[in-house]
Image (spheres, rainbow, N blue to C red):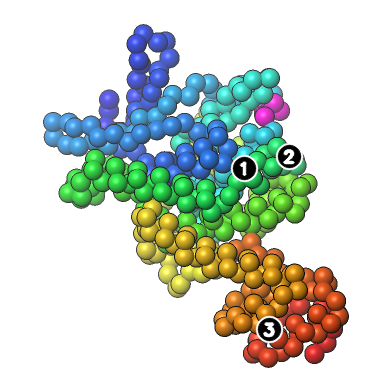
């Protein structure tokens, strides 16, 4: 097996005609691959392979190798080129569930060559991601040289005509039955255990030696930027609320609501270009080679961009300057921030039911403002005063009047101070 970073070697078990495993030396971000596999497994139950990072002891070095389950079939790129009619036979539930995962995890390199098209029975096809270690980035990053914001949330899934179709009802119901907090906590607990395994496989001195290499990179242990994990949790809450309140949403509607600027970019591409390849090439600034295949440009991502964080809670720092969090630290972040959200969600429910005491006792003006105005980032809707009687509106207005709010929008309020 070659130790080149782009080399993938097939491994045959017994005398099979097809490989059972693919081995890739120097996987760039195996921890992110693991996280994405967990999101697929728990949300969709399909859409990716299973992989394991192993340590190969060579004569002169320790080699990280990612061993992945072999998925057989044509790539999506090959289907575009040779069997485009298969795109009309996508299994609707599977496609909607793949969209959910993508909407939550912000894929950054979802090229057609990174998906296998697999028959799932009944004449239907689905996609299996075979390269997904670029995820959890902000929607946009700023180019270091030009200063222009460039789209980072890039996947062929959002470029298909099916984006303009209604979310599959079975996929919607299944997603609504998932508990966001429990599911994400389970994913990061598993990642915490996986991270401990990586630490045993590759001691810190080995990782330090890797960092001296100029052509090969393998980022272990698992790390996310501060705020990444909670951003996924927040998007999940918003998506849950959207699907619960709007059963007729399309995939594009969901993208526009969760990632507004990204949604506008994809919406424009869907209107302007006729093929998914053209749409993604324009959006991602990909080059198309002589065979009509999109080529990735993300390997130099760390070197040519600085990050502008899109989350509202970020301090004045670039994305790459944000603190790196282990899965354990990310889990603590979710628990801390998620508790605050859960408390506010409970208070919002109490206020909507006409119980204003808990709102009045809130010490934080900011929290009171969120209850009244809502918080799109956390999926909390604005308070609709139209559900209250005139007497209730007047009572709540007296509470509001006693606090030094700078600005407020009171939706459906018919009473006056």
Q: Secondary structure at mark 3?
A: loop
Judged from this view, the residue extending furthest toward the left is: 59
Q: Secondary structure at mark 1?
A: helix
Q: Which residue is mark 3?
A: 407
Q: Which residue is mark 1?
A: 99
Q: CA distance from mark 3 to mark 1?
A: 37 Å
Quarter where residue 53 is shown: top left
The prevailing secondary structure element of the residues shown in magenta is: helix
Name which residue lies at 60% across and 46% down.
Answer: 178
Quarter where residue 64 is shown: top left
- Residue 350, image x and y in percent? 69, 70
Quarter where residue 262 is shown: bottom right
Earlier sequence position, callout 3 versus callout 1: 1
Q: Residues within 10 Å of mark 3 (few under 14, many from 20)?
A: few
- Is the N terminus in the top left, top right, bottom left or bottom right quadrant? top left
Q: In the rendered view, does 390 fall on the left or right side of 129?
A: right
Above or below, comparing residue 200 to residue 405 in the picture: above
The part of the chain drawn in magenta is 87-91
Name which residue lies at 42% across and 10% down.
Answer: 17
Can residue 324 be seen? yes
Q: Is label 2 or label 1 in front?
A: 2
Q: Which residue is mark 2?
A: 169
Q: In the rendered view, does 185 fall on the left or right side of 348?
A: left
Q: Which mark is residue 31?
A: none
């Amino acid at each position: 097996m070659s130790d080149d970073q782009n080399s993938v070697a097939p491994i045959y078990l017994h005398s099979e005609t097809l490989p059972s495993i693919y081995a890739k030396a120097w996987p760039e971000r195996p921890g992110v691959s693991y996280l994405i596999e967990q999101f697929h497994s728990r949300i969709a139950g399909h859409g990716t392979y299973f992989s394991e990072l192993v340590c190969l002891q060579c004569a002169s070095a320790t080699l990280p190798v990612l061993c992945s389950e072999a998925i057989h079939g044509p790539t999506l790129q090959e289907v575009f080129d040779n069997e485009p009619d298969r795109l009309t036979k996508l299994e609707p539930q599977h496609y909607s569930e793949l969209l959910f995962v993508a909407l939550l995890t912000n894929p950054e390199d979802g090229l057609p060559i990174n998906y296998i098209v697999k028959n799932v029975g009944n004449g239907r096809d689905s996609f299996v991601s075979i390269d997904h270690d670029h995820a959890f980035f902000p929607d946009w990053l700023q180019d270091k040289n030009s200063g222009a914001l460039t789209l980072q949330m890039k996947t062929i899934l959002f470029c298909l005509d099916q984006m303009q179709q209604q979310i599959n009802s079975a996929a919607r119901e299944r997603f609504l039955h998932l508990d966001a907090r429990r599911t994400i906590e389970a994913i990061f607990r598993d990642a915490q255990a996986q991270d401990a395994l990586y630490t045993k496989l590759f001691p810190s001195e080995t990782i330090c030696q890797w960092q001296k290499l100029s052509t090969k990179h393998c980022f272990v242990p698992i790390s996310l930027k501060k705020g990444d994990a909670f951003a996924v949790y927040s998007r999940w809450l918003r998506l849950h609320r959207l699907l619960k309140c709007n059963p007729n949403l399309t995939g594009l509607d969901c993208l526009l609501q969760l990632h507004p600027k990204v949604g506008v970019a994809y919406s424009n591409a869907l209107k302007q270009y006729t093929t998914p390849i053209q749409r993604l090439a324009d959006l991602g600034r990909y080059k198309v080679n002589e065979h009509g295949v999109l080529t990735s440009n993300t390997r130099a991502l760390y070197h040519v961009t600085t990050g502008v964080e899109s989350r509202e809670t970020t301090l004045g720092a670039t994305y790459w300057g944000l603190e790196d969090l282990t899965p354990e630290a990310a889990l603590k972040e979710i628990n801390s921030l998620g508790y605050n959200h859960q408390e506010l969600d409970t208070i919002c429910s109490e206020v909507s039911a006409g119980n204003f005491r808990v709102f009045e006792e809130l010490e934080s003006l900011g929290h009171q403002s969120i209850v009244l105005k809502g918080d799109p980032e956390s999926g909390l809707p604005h308070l609709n005063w139209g559900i209250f009687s005139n007497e209730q509106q007047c009572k709540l207005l007296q509470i509001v009047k006693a606090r030094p709010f700078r600005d407020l929008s009171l939706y459906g309020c018919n009473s006056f101070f």
